[in-house]
Amino acid sequence: MNNIMIGRFIPGESFIHRLDPRTKMIATFVYIFVMLWADSWQTYLWAAIFIFASIKLTSQPLKLYWDGLKPIFCLILFTVVLQLLFTPGTPTLLKIGPLQITTTGVVNAVYVMIRFILIILMSTILTLTTPPTSIANAIESLLKPLKKIRVPVAELALMLSIALRFVPLLMDETQKIMNAQKSRGMSFSSGGPIKRAKAIIPLLIPLFIGALQRALDLANAMEVRGFKDAVQRTKYRVLKYNRVDYFAFGCLGVFTVIFIGIKLIS
Amino acid sequence: MTKAIKINNLNYNYNEDHTLFEDFNLSIEEGQWVALVGHNGSGKSTLAKLILGLMVANSGKICVFDEQLTTDTVYHVREQIGMVFQNPDNQFVGATVADDVAFGLENKQIPNKEMAKTIDEALAVVGMQDFKNREPHTLSGGQKQRVALASVLALKPKIIILDEATAMLDPDGRDTVMRTLKLLKAQFGSELTLITITHDMDEAALADRVVVINDGQLILDGEPEDVFKQTNLIHENGLELPFSAELVASLQHKPKHYLNERELIQWLSNLNK
């Protein structure tokens, strides 16, 4: 079950773990944005150095990052093949009907693959070192300006954190329902795609009903504990930038400046 | 003595065909431990929801510490009552134990600085202080229910209602929760009114007073010893006596009053002497 968990958090005390979740989110977004401008092997190399330095700082085994890459391998492969087959340019290495493989295509394919891998690695760093609630908190804090245009940020953040809290529970329940149905002869893995899709329906209905029941119970429990709305509340976990965060922002700044420098020179 | 809860002429029906409460009356003294028992569908959980304003009665008066429950007073009434529900998972709001206890405090707008201390204290009362940063799916059912109890205690209510809080637990979990309740009662004494809704008579036997309801009717009301003497009435209403009392009822020679399991073993072993 743990393999499908998107954003598996591993507790720790590393430099990256101690960063404010907002710092990590901002860094991730800045990094992804910067990567869009990468166009030469020097820039990719620099971006890769930054990522591997960050990975080192999380003190987590590399295998975890490999696990983070695996699920999207097909997607990477798909884009690489598309790049490879449909990039026009010269010189042409191979030509089969309308498809051609060009040197530009090969270079682009490699770049796209590296870009993908680096971006995934960056977001894996975020999710490995930050508990989901902290991410929800960070989102709430970063979206605060949207309150001015009446976006219900506090409500959305509370919804997000409750949703995250119920993910493992609903997964367990899914497994239980599947086992109950398997024990009565249901098969989820045989037959064609239509037959398999049909097998999902009797799984979804009890799951939905169960989820609704949980929602009603939870609403009662929340009301009894004095919940009126998400706005008139104080906060138990208050986010605060510390020295490590200023240091991290400094590093991010240096990375970006050098990146632009490399891009201008090459 | 002050009345913690006073219910007068309560009427409630689910729909036109099904009336549940008809001119129902009940009052509970401050500091009492009352067990509300009845089989499934007897209306005991509905009663708790009516007291908390989670459901609205058709007519009648519900007073909590002499304050009548209305749409204006409902939030103030809820501040004085804490409730632990049946399903341990469905009442766990926070992502960790500490966050869950904090949820009620956040709603009450307690300043951030005071929260940590209150959370630690509340968790210590139920013996869960070492689990502060654990996530709910790593806890057992009994542990989750103790966290739920801590979440309620942190808000310092005068009344705590447990709605079948041990029904989904294994025997060990049930024992720890019941032990925690006994500790609570010993610690807070007359300042805490405890209402346990249950169909487990062994649990009910711990209370000062047992109230049996069925189909919204008050069937029996009194001290556990007296209530458990009414064997027939209890069986007629779909309930069972505590194991020891059930055994006594089928004995030839009978002890004169209610004994719990340990006392009964003592009594039985004295029979042969």
Image (cartoon, coloured by chain):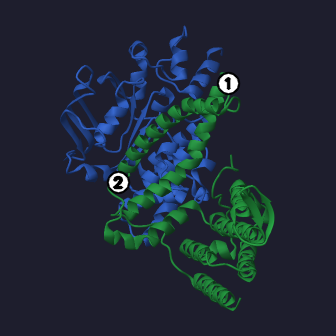
Q: Quadrant of the N terminus of chain B?
A: top left
Q: Quadrant of the C terminus of chain B?
A: top right
Q: Nearer the viewer, residue B124 or A108?
A: A108
Identify by letter the chain in blue.
B
Of label 1 and label 2, which has the lower sequence position? 1
Sort mark 2 into few (<14), some (14-19) or many (20+) by Cα contacts within 10 Å: many
How many numbered tags mark residues here?
A: 2
Check contact, mark 1 vs mark 2: CB within 8 A: no
As drawn, A61 above or below A210: below
Q: Is residue B168 left or right of residue A251?
A: left
Mark 1, residue position: A183
Query: Pointer 2 indicates a residue of which chain?
Result: A
Q: Nearer the viewer, residue A208 or A116?
A: A116
Q: Amino acid at mark 1?
A: Ser
Sort mark 1 into few (<14), some (14-19) or many (20+) by Cα contacts within 10 Å: few
Q: Residue at x 57, y 26 (%)?
A: B261
Q: Nearer the viewer, residue B137 or A6?
A: A6
Helix, strand or loop for disc 1: loop
Which marked residue is nearer to the observer: mark 1 or mark 2? 1
Q: Amino acid at mark 2?
A: Gly
Mark 2, residue position: A226
Q: Position of residue A33 (x, y in %)?
A: 58, 75
Query: Pointer 1 indicates a residue of which chain?
Result: A
